[in-house]
Image (tube, helix red, strand yellow):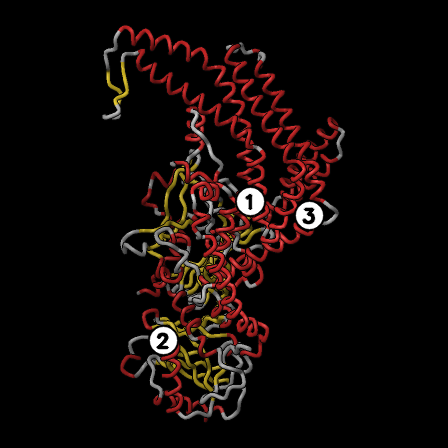
Amino acid sequence: MVVKVFFPTSCSAADSGLLVGRWIAEQSSAVVLAVLHFPFVPGQVKQYLTDVRLASGLGLAVLGSWSNSAEEKREELEQFLEDLRIIFCHEPWLQIRREKSTKFWSCQAIRSQQESAAEEIKVILIYHDQRKVMLSLLHPPESHLAAGDHRTEPLSTGGASELAAVFNTVAQSRVLFMTDKYDEGPVRLTHWQSEGVEGSILVELLKQASGPVCMFLTFLLSLLSAVCKSRVLQMWPLSFLWSKLSTCEQLGHRLHQLRLLCSSKKAQDQIQFTRKANILVSFLLDIVLGVLLLSWLYSKNRIGQLADTLIPMADYVAQELQDLLQWLMGVPAGLKMNRALDQVLGRFFQYHIHLWISYIHLMSPFIEMILWYIGLSTCLGFTMALSIFSDVIALLTFHIYCFYVYGARLYCLKIYGLSSLWRLFRGKKWNVLRQRVDSCSYDLDQLFIGTLLFTILLFLLPTTALYYLVFTLLRLVVVLVQGLIHLLVDMINSLPLYSLALRLCRSYRLAAGVKFRVLEQQTGKPLRLLMQINPLSYGRVVQLYSLPTSSSYPKDSWGSLLKKLFLGELIYPWRQKDNKQD
Amino acid sequence: MQEQQFTNIYGGAISLQCRSYDAASCREFSVCTQKLSLRGLTACTCAVWLAAYALFAYTENSAVLSAAIFVTLIGLLFYLHFVKIDQESLLVIASLGIQMTSYYASGKESTTFIEMNNVKDVVINEAIYMQKVIYYLCILLKDPVDPHGISEVVPVFQTSAARHLPTRWTASKAAGPSNSFEGAVQVEINMCILETTL
């Protein structure tokens, strides 16, 4: 039989005494938590252990004796420690002895008389850093995660594992370590000593201050959400508008996060705390970036320059579009189009551009003012500025969107007409009730008219298809730009910066597991191992802790996208994907 | 400590070191592969730089040359830090678990520890890889839900020691794998595990 003793390195220099810890019987491992010093009254020690047991919910006990031979009166002490075994009876009783001359400790586990004859007990000493083990959060390996939701409870799945039990034991005995350094308890213990409340006065002050701040913020948020929920803003044209603007979506997402952050409920475990901290850090980073952008924008009259370049840009785009239309109305790429239809479509689109340009010029005196006020909103965050930018792009390229819709509708109509007339051509029809193609006998007139229409549609198709193709490409460029902006916004929203910083600076806090190092050996002495914490890889940190984002990416693949493009169904930018049905 | 020489599937020499601590209840097996060869490194660098110089002579743009230097430097760092594994070691602590460590050429270590109560068995498995039959040592992990099932197969010494199946071995399986690299390690590991469970 092998007994594993998890021994904290902070106790290795302690005076002689008793080992206090937890015995995990099913794994035959002993987790030493502290060394108890003389003098003590056995009754008091038992009372103290029961108190700690109640507070931490762990079966703490006296596991054995520890003697550090730096002291004198060795034989006497040995006898005394042996006697203590009768008072605190424990199975098996550990005896760890440290001699001054050597770094190899002798370690024995003794069972009571009747069993001891059966076999010799081997001992493995495993050193660990108590503080790191207490603070670290053990994540179960990747394969265990496939089944359940890993975000909520990573420890529960690994509950059966041996190391998780050790980590749990050390983490739950926080009560033992968190006592003040100068506190005179009933017993004297050596273990990793926290600095106490005085150690981090700033943190304590922040903790005290965070309560009222959260209350105040919650009050403000409730006011804001009451305004948002008012009837006036929920009426039809407005609510439709809100759902289409990415700025509103981003604002809602931020409000939701703030509400989560300021909720009066305390974070129950480390995971929820980490998530809150992640939200807070990403929020702060967002604001800082936003303020930097703001200071950049409002210095040296950059807004005015921007407004001055915006109008020529819009003019330039319109001019390019007009040239494109002229080209399409002639003989584009040597294709011979239906001249009449070509002219009609070209004039229609040109008139549209003309309308658009006159609107822009009508607005041009006010653009600088509008930009100035919009620019103020960057103090709400960089992501907000990006969302507004995306919305502005959508508004400024509204004519492209319109062209695309007209072209797509026309093309769609033609494709559907052609497909149904093709069925008529073959003597079939679509049965709506049965959702299938049935055969049908048509009259001669119907067949004649149908065939005639089919021919007309077929010959007009290339002209419409060309217009559709050109405007779809333009639209796709705009959608791509918007998609990139949304990707950036989502990245800032979801990046778990706090967890990444923890991984970088305190890599033991997020543990993927442990690693052992074999220390020097001597025959006859127990095996000595050093347990170190194996940090989580950066990829896994991002995967586990990334915050949920508001937007939904398109579910459809490239194939279905191409199919949609071919059939002339409308394609929306990514945000509005879920509203496609209505 | 003892050292044995073997070859991997590409014919390169690998050496296996076995070391045991504390009356064989804790053993360490480490496989050293060939060190980074100077010849290969020089050839790669020369190839990149010659190509860059040819491009430079054609375009007369000196940015090409500096780009080539950066590409070689970054490529070398990447190769040393993420690709080239110098040594792989397997530490079997009988009552605790199995620890696999890879040491990269840049000094980076990556460690995986498998607890003993998750280990179902250590077996030699066969696989078809690039028109060859190779065999490799792997650890079978228990499925936490189904006690008889296997949740995962973890290959050991993955990068350094994948080997050919010798034709002699297929002809007579009775000879046993104990004369091969995997066989030697497997027998040792199983002995180590058995010693404590019995």
Q: Looking at the picture, does residue B147 appear above or below residue A409? A: below
Q: Please state the horizontal and vertical placement of residue B84, each as a whole percent of the image.
A: 56, 47
Residue drawn at x 70%, y 37% is: A308
Query: Which residue position is annotated with label 3?
Result: A297
Query: Quick check: A90 left or right of A473?
Result: left
Query: Which residue position is annotated with label 1?
Result: A387
Task: Kindly identify the amino acid type of the residue bearing the numbered disc 3.
Answer: Leu
Q: Dividing the image into 4 quarters, which one contains the C terminus of chain A? A: top left
Callout in the foreground (2, 3): 3
Q: Looking at the picture, does residue A357 appear above or below residue A132? A: above
Q: Please state the horizontal and vertical placement of residue A293, each as a whole percent of the image.
A: 65, 50
Reading the chain from its start, which is encountered first: label 1 or label 2? Answer: 2
How crowded is the residue under tag 1: few (<14 C-alpha within 10 Å), some, or many (20+)?
A: many
Residue B120, image quadrant: bottom left
Query: Which residue position is annotated with label 2?
Result: A57
Q: Chain of mark 2?
A: A
Reading the chain from its start, which is encountered first: label 3 or label 1? Answer: 3
Q: Dividing the image into 4 quarters, which one contains the N terminus of chain A? A: bottom left
